[in-house]
Amino acid sequence: MDVERGMLRALEQARRAAEIGEVPVGAVVFADDVLVAQAHNQTELLNDVSAHAEMLCLTAAAHAIGAKYLRECTLFVTLEPCVMCAGALKWAQIGTVVYAASDPKAGFSTLAPASKIFHPHTRVVAGVLKEQAAALISEFFKNRRR
């Protein structure tokens, strides 16, 4: 799976979130090279603090492949997962997590390195298209402050 292609799909989801006033975070899950789930933040829409892109994507992926463990799957997400999402990804035993921009305020790495947070077999790749993802988030909050 080409990591840039996967992240571009996640960025599409992030843009959809921004269009409806949600923090622009998008996520997609691929099983091999097949897209099995896609989501964006919906915390405002659903009035649910747990409706992060990663959480919604995990649920959709589990339903799509018919299994709770996603060992053969790759999650692409535009922002470093928070601790809640990282915990869910650990329990799902996701095969690979690829994220774009770091989150120095709420990302999992503020607490511990990936090796302490995720399942031991989960591979983590950071910084793919990070400038594009960071620009989306910056622009969203800049506009919100106006």
Image (cartoon, helix red, strand yellow):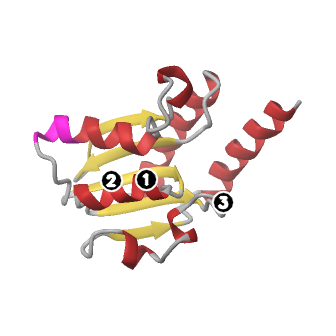
Q: Identify residue for label 3.
A: 105
Sequence-wise, the earlier of marks 3 and 2 is 2
Main secondary-structure element of the magenta-colored stretch: helix
Q: Amino acid at mark 1?
A: Met
Q: Which residue is mark 1?
A: 84
Mark 2: which amino acid?
A: Ala
Q: Where, quadrant-wise, is the N terminus in this rendering?
A: bottom left
Q: Disc 3 on helix, strand or loop?
A: loop
Assign the C terminus to one quadrant of the image: top right
**Residue 144: x, y in percent?**
79, 31
Characterize the local packing of mark 2: few (<14), some (14-19) or many (20 or more) Cα atoms within 10 angstroms. some
Q: Count residues near mark 3 (Cα–Cα under 10 Å), then give few for <14, some for 14-19, many for 20+.
A: few
Secondary structure, mark 1, is: helix
User: Where is 15 relative to 8, above or below?
Assistant: above
Q: Position of residue 44 (x, y in %)?
A: 56, 25
* Residue farthest toward the right in the current orientation of the protein: 146
Kindly check if marks 1 and 2 are in contact, taking CB atoms under 8 A apart as contact: yes
Tell me the residue that label 2 is attached to: 88
For image coordinates 11% across by 45% down, the residue present is 67
Q: Residue at x 47, y 77 (%)?
A: 113
The part of the chain drawn in magenta is 62-66
The residue closer to the viewer here, 62 or 38, is: 62
Real-space CA distance between mark 1 and mark 2, rounded to the nearest whole angstrom? 6 Å
- The single residue placed furthest to the left in the displayed view is 66
Visible residue check, residue 76: yes
Residue 127 picture location, percent across and down: 56, 65
- In this rendering, would 99 be left or right of 69? right
User: Where does the image place residue 137, in percent across and percent down from the top left?
Assistant: 69, 44
Earlier-in-chain disc, 1 versus 3: 1
Can residue 1 be seen? no
Say if the magenta span includes residue 27.
Answer: no
Q: Secondary structure at mark 2?
A: helix
